[in-house]
Amino acid sequence: QVKLVESGGGSVEAGGSLTLSCVASGYNSGGTSCMGWFRQGPGKEREGVAVADRDGSTGYGDSVKGRVTVYKDNHKNSLYLQMNDLKPEDSAMYYCAADGPQYNGDCNLKNLEVWGEGTLDVVSS
């Protein structure tokens, strides 16, 4: 059974930094192909943050471009999200997601179907 476990959430002041980690388990020897991060703030819709493919290509949501870096470690079957210059509006539950049995090879957030339980980030002003 595939599983994603996030860590690294916490409380930080505006302007600070956080690094989130996600470890995938239960995949076959090839590991995950595509992994990404979503977030959902209080009273807000779920928002795509970043995505990373096995080949190293990445993509970012408009609201975080220039402030975050996503990195996929294929050997460790892990995904990391380095967030800098955090703002109060970045406060949210951050969820890791990865490809599942129906994955079509197109590394896009909308094609990820395995989810972690989330980690909470709170940015105070």
Image (cartoon, rainbow, N blue to C red):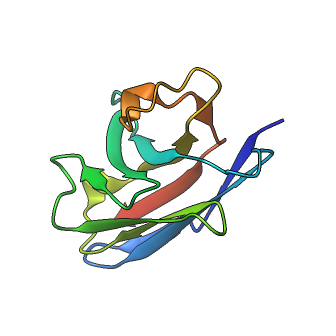
Q: In which quarter of the image is the N terminus?
A: top right
Q: Which of 104 and 94 is in front in this view?
A: 104
The x and y percentages for residue 27 are 75, 44
The x and y percentages for residue 123 are 37, 64
In the image: residue 42, left or right of residue 115: left
Say if 19 sits above or below 29 in the image.
below
> Can the viewer see residue 71?
yes
The x and y percentages for residue 5 are 70, 53
The residue positioned 77% from the left and 45% from the top of the image is 28
> Can the viewer see residue 9?
no
Name the residue furthest bottom.
16
Say if 13 sits above or below 36 in the image.
below
In the image: residue 41, left or right of residue 30: left
The residue positioned 16% from the left and 66% from the top of the image is 66
Q: Nearer the viewer, residue 81 or 73?
A: 73
The residue positioned 28% from the left and 66% from the top of the image is 68
In the image: residue 115, left or right of residue 123: right
